[in-house]
Image (spheres, rainbow, N blue to C red):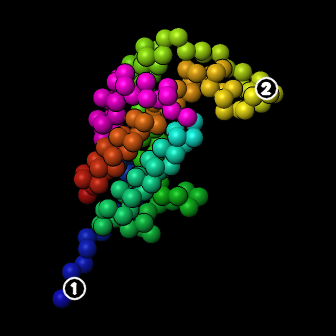
């Protein structure tokens, strides 16, 4: 006798996003207000932050569609070939960390002497490499981006776990 695995509803509901938001905020909070995260972000290279973004996407995908055996990727609603649930997870993951950082005033608190003036056009006209120029002229924005990527590693775990545990 073969047991059928239970199927979840195909429709992605607002309640699913709410579950992701709770999980994402729950695990992101402690890391947004920790000075060590901001010091680490200040010492990271942009390529390291972009690698972390790729890792967050991989963790999110694996948590939703590989670790959870009751969810079938083929049954998910899609936008341009990407599952809506996965898009929601990524928006919640990075959005929750960014929102908490801005609400708590973390960039201004931990990056007091950072340069805030950015000149995107000047970055590409300068003789120095583009990434190094960006680091000196947009320090506050760039370091905040790197801190958000660090916090998103934890946020994606919370959001994906909440989505999987509380799914009906």
- Location of residue 129 with respect to 87 vertically, above or below: above
Q: Is residue 125 left or right of residue 57?
A: right
Residue 88 visible in the displayed image:
no
Question: On the image, numbered disc 2 is attached to which residue?
Answer: 126
Q: Residue 157: image x %, image y %?
A: 33, 46
Res 61 quadrant in image: bottom left
Q: Which residues are magenta?
A: 20-45
Q: Residue 58: image x %, image y %?
A: 45, 54
> Which quarter of the figure is the C terminus placed in?
bottom left
Other residues around mark 2 within 10 Å, as few (<14) / some (14–19) / many (≥20): few
> Tags 1 and 2 in contact by the CB under 8 Å rule?
no
Residue occupying the point 48% across, 58% down: 83
Mark number, residue 78: none
Residue occupying the point 58% across, 21% down: 139
Q: Residue 105: image x %, image y %?
A: 43, 16
Question: On the image, numbered disc 1 is attached to which residue?
Answer: 2
- Disc 2 secondary structure class: loop
Residue occupying the point 35% across, 56% down: 63
């Amino acid at each position: 006798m073969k047991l059928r695995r239970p199927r979840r509803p195909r429709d992605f509901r607002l309640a699913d996003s709410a579950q992701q938001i709770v999980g994402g905020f729950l695990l992101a909070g402690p890391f947004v207000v920790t000075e060590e995260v901001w010091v680490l972000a200040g010492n990271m290279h942009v390529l390291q932050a972009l690698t972390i973004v790729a890792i967050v996407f991989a963790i999110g995908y694996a948590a939703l569609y590989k670790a959870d055996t009751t969810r079938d990727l083929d049954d998910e609603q899609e936008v341009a070939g990407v599952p809506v649930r996965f898009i929601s997870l990524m928006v919640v993951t990075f959005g929750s960390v960014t929102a908490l950082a801005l609400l708590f005033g973390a960039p201004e608190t931990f990056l007091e002497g950072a340069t805030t003036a950015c000149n995107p056009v000047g970055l590409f006209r300068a003789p120095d490499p583009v990434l190094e120029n960006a680091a000196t002229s947009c320090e506050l924005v760039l370091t905040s981006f790197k801190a958000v990527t660090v916090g998103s590693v934890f946020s994606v775990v919370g959001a994906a776990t909440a989505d999987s545990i509380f799914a009906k």
